[in-house]
Amino acid sequence: MPTDPYHWVGDNVSCILEQPVYLGHTVNFKTHRQSYKIKKTVDNPKEQWKIFPNTHEPIVDEDTFNRVQELRKNKRRPTRTGKTNMFSGIVRCADCREKMYYCTTNNFEKRQDHFVCSASRTKGKEVCGTHFIRAIILEQGVLHHIQAVMWLVANYEEKFRAALGAMQKSEMKKALSSKKKQVNQIERRIDELDRLFKKVYEDYANEKLSEARYEILSGDYETEQAELRERLETLTAEIEQQEEQAEDIDKFIAKVKKYLEMTELTPVILNDLVKAVYVHKPKKVDGRRVVDIDVSYDFVGILPKSLFEDIKNEPME
Ligand SMILES: [Zn+2]
């Protein structure tokens, strides 16, 4: 036993966070021996691991596991001062979609800490210069937004579910019909290529076409068909995924309910509920500087403002 079993170094923890074993899967072939004469084992790349799903009771559920993998892709660098902010990596510019930098110095008072669009730093202020928000304002804004969602879920859960469901359905319908159209077009083109292929083959057989010409044409058709088949597969997978979204609303509501008693925003709550916060250009309202933010939630994305108004305006039953 180590002297202090709770003193875990970062590497251990990150290693644990990436283990599918905790999902109840068994992982084999993680290492191999280069030769039976050498005892030393060599790590295999992750792609060569064999995962046998659900061989034992899971410790973490699949959603939590996937969420952690996402968060880990988004590692935060501490600033030179050593200060960090829970919004680093989460907050993005609404216009250029780049991440916003956390700016702080030891001379700043806390209320002066702020985020700026990273494009303004790397590509110049002309590219995207006006996106700026103080950390304190951002935190208050997101807290209020989450509290508004919680209020809706706590008081109008059924309406919230129905409204969100209806909204997603109509958006999904649009997205789905455009994707299904693309699928049809691709399938038609694949059939057409089959016919073209048959035609050049016959022409070649009847000596109407030279061998060199035949090879070029048939090669082109084959390449195009292979590309189309791949695109078709992606589209079909996307369509299937979208059709499963109803479940996501329930998952989101369950998450929100865990935090109904929350009074302040913590990194745990933020990371669990929120995928990204988009900061818009500031505007002047009655002489005051106002910055709009969009909060994109895990599972459901950005909830439109109308959703809040529609539910609140409906008479209580
Ligand atoms: Zn920007």
Image (spheres, rainbow, N blue to C red):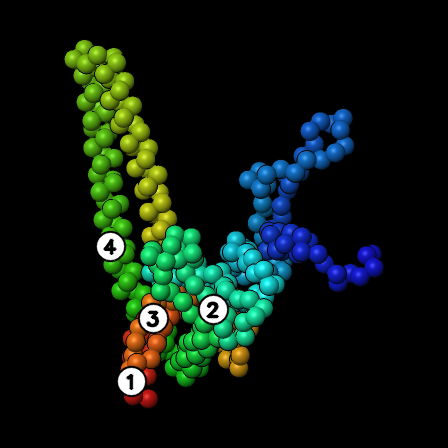
Q: Which residue is mark 4?
A: 177
Q: 243 or 315: nearer the eye?
A: 315
Q: Which residue is mark 1?
A: 313
Q: Earlier in the sequence, mark 3 or mark 2?
A: 2
Ligand 1 within 8 Å of disc 3? The answer is no
Q: Which residue is mark 2?
A: 114
Disc 2 and disc 4: Cα gap in Å?
A: 42 Å
Q: Earlier in the sequence, mark 1 or mark 4?
A: 4
Q: In the figure, residue 250 lies in which quadrant?
A: bottom left
Q: For numbered disc 1, what is the local secondary structure?
A: helix
Count of numbered circles in the view: 4
User: Which label number is shown at residue 282?
Assistant: 3
203 sits to left or right of 215: left
Quadrant of the drawing holding the C terminus = bottom left
Q: State whether residue 118 appears in this view.
A: yes
Nearer to us of marks 3 and 1 is 3
Q: 171 or 105: nearer the eye?
A: 105
Give the crowd class for mark 1: few <14, some 14-19, many >=20 residues within 10 Å: few
Q: In the figure, residue 225 lies in which quadrant?
A: top left
